[in-house]
Image: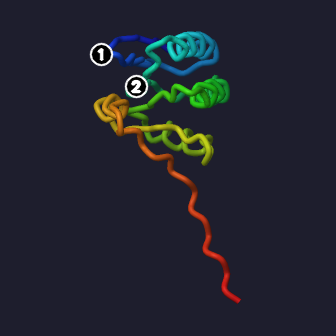
């Protein structure tokens, strides 16, 4: 997996490209953690060129994403393939959902004041009437 970092104003965009594997996940974790700990910690992960390859590295990749998502600087994710969308939805929690956008423009715009998306909470079942 290759990671390319670029800036759009105060926002860092990380393009992930290639095949997801176990070794690349460690470097991804270090790079992403360093960026989120910087003063300008507005980060968008663009997954448009990342390919899902078997189970090698998937569990580690999800652990890294969940750890990053639990930080106070919520990263944004965009351009997820249908496989990654399913994986993200399966591993997110109601308390800490991933902030996923259809494209990079939407993800970048979400950092503007007042544009933070509300977390999607699970639906509650109505009480049963006696």
Residue displayed at 30% across by 16% down = 8
Task: State the image coordinates of residue 33 (x, y, percent, origin top left).
Answer: 57, 15
Left or right of 103? Residue 66 is right
Q: Which residue is mark 1?
A: 9
Left or right of 17? Residue 56 is right
Q: Nearer the viewer, residue 10 or 46?
A: 10
Quarter holding residue 57:
top right
Residue displayed at 62% across by 41% down = 91
| Residue 46: numbered disc | 2
Residue 93 position (above or below residue 1): below
Quarter holding residue 115:
top left
| Residue 52: numbered disc | none
Residue 1 position (above or below residue 82): above
Q: Nearer the viewer, residue 54 or 24?
A: 24
Left or right of 60? Residue 49 is left
Task: State the image coordinates of residue 117 (x, y, percent, origin top left).
Answer: 42, 43
Task: State the image coordinates of residue 13 (x, y, percent, origin top left).
Answer: 38, 18
Name which of mark 1 and mark 2 comes first in the sequence.
1
Q: Residue furthest front?
A: 113
Residue displayed at 41% across by 24% down = 44
Quarter holding residue 112:
top left
**Crowd band around label 1 with a 10 angstrom C-alpha radius: few (<14), some (14–19), many (20+):** few
Numbered marks: total: 2
Q: Provide the secondary structure element on which disc 1 rests.
A: loop
Q: Provide the secondary structure element on which disc 2 rests.
A: strand
Q: CA distance from mark 1 to mark 2?
A: 16 Å
Q: Residue furthest right?
A: 130
Q: Nearer the viewer, residue 95 or 31?
A: 95
Task: State the image coordinates of residue 28 (x, y, percent, origin top left).
Answer: 55, 14
């Amino acid at each position: 997996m290759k990671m390319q970092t670029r800036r759009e104003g105060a926002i860092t965009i990380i393009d992930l490209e290639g095949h997801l594997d176990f070794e690349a996940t460690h470097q991804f974790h270090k790079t992403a953690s360093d960026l989120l700990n910087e003063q300008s910690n507005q980060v968008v992960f663009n997954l448009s060129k990342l390919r899902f390859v078997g189970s090698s590295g998937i569990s580690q990749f999800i652990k890294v994403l969940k750890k990053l998502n639990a930080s106070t600087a919520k990263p944004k994710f965009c351009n997820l393939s249908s496989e990654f969308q399913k994986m993200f939805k399966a591993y997110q929690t109601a308390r800490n959902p991933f902030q996923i956008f259809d494209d990079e423009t939407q993800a970048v715009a979400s950092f503007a004041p007042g544009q933070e998306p509300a977390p999607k909470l699970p639906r509650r079942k109505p009480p049963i009437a006696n």
